[in-house]
Every structure is written in C-alpha cells, then in structure tokens.
Image: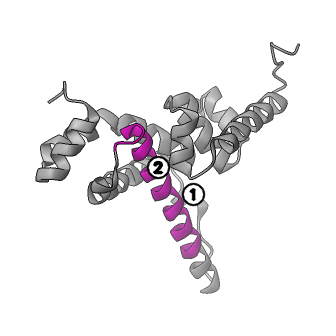
Amino acid sequence: MSSSTDNDLVARAVSGQDSAAFGELVRRHQSHVRNFLRKLSGDYTLADDLAQDCFMHAWDKLQTYSGRGSFIGWLLKVAYTTFLQSKRKSKRYAEILDSAGHVADQESRSHVAPDDEVTDLDKFLAVLTEEERAIMVMSYACGLSHREIGDATDMPVGTVKSVIFRGKQKIRNSFDIKDHKHG
C-alpha cells in the first residue's frame, strides 16, 4: 500500500470505505498537518486535537476530493477550515464566559511550547497575521504551489502571491533583514 499514490488510496477509501487506505493517507500526511496547525495556533496540544478533528472531517468529506490538485493541498484546506472553526467556537466560548462574569484564564487555555523550544521560524511567523502565517506555512513548510494554496484558501493566485510578498516584507522589516536582491 505504501507504493500507491494518494489518489489511488483516496479512490480505494471512497469506493469501498477502505479504512486501511485512509489510514495510509493519515500516516503519510499527519506530520504535515500537525506542523501546519502548530504554526497556526502556537499551541501544541490544541494543534494535536485539531489534527484529529481534521482527519475525521477529511474521512467524512473524502468523496468531495476531486483529484484536482494535490491531496495534501486539499487536506490542508480541511485543516485550515478546522482551525478557523475552532477559533470561532473558542471566541464564542470566551464571550459567553465574559458575559457570565467569568474571566477566562489564558494560562489554562494555552499550552505554547516553552521559550527554549521557540525557533527563529516561530518568531518570524509571530509578526504575521493569521492569514499570512497560514499561507506562508503552506508555501514554504508544506511546499504547495500558489494554485494549491489558492484552492486551499479560496483565494485567487494573484492574492496568494501578494500575501506571500507582504509577509516576506513584514518579516524583513520586523527583523531588519536585508533583501539580498535589492541591497
């Protein structure tokens, strides 16, 4: 099964509800999905929970994967949607607690990696908006093409290119990094 393409495995999983084929897809892509969600959320525990949710959603929606674009691009779209839904739920929950007179304890909700585990990449990504961070991670960490990122985020390719350009500029400006092409 490890020599099968992603599209072959998807077809097997969809046609016969082959959980072993889907299990192979999970094995192949779980580290990409977890790392993507960790970079978006900054919370390792939350990212692991979201990755599980993502794969459950992916199993439920697998028949919607058309084979157009890469499977990992489609899967990261599911992961990004799962992340955004989680943020909306979390925000609503905090608003409910606030309206009930409770102060949400930030420490209990966040399990960010200790400072000694924060990488330069984490510092660079921290200056970006959530959308910029997602697109930069899809491009540079996951290796998706601009078209695949556009499909995953429902953005035109030109917008994806602009977000990547702005994100790189923001990182350069925030950390006083000189652009080697322009001096």
Q: Which residues are magenta?
A: 67-93
Q: Is residue 130 visible?
A: yes
Task: Give coordinates of residue 68: x percent, y percent.
Answer: 40, 42
Identify residue type, mark 1: Glu
Point out the residue furthest to the bottom here: 100
Residue at image location 41% in from the left, 54% down from the top? 50
Q: Residue furthest right?
A: 183
- Placement of the N terminus among the 4 image quadrants: top left
**Front in this rendered view, residue 109 or 54:** 54
Write down the quadrant of residue 53 in the picture.
Answer: bottom left
What label sits on residue 131 in the rendered view? none
Question: Residue 27, image x and y in percent?
Answer: 26, 36
Q: Residue at x 34, y 36 (%)?
A: 29
CB contact under 8 Å: marks 2 and 1: no
Q: Residue at x 87, y 16 (%)?
A: 182
Horizontally, residue 180 falls left or right of residue 117, namely: right
Q: Which residue is mark 2?
A: 77
Do we see residue 42 in this rendering?
A: no
Does dot 1 land on a helix, a strand or a loop?
Answer: helix
Horizontal side, residue 166 vs residue 5: left or right: right
Of mark 2 and mark 1, the one earlier in the sequence is 2
- In the image, residue 44 lies in the stretch drawn in magenta: no
At 82% from the left and 18% from the top, the residue drawn is 179
* Mark drawn on residue 107: 1
Give the vertical position of 89 relative to 54 (above or below): below
**164 and 102: which is toward the camera:** 164
| Residue kind at label 2, given as amino acid type | Lys
Residue 42 located left or right of residue 7 = right
Q: Is residue 87 left or right of residue 47?
A: right
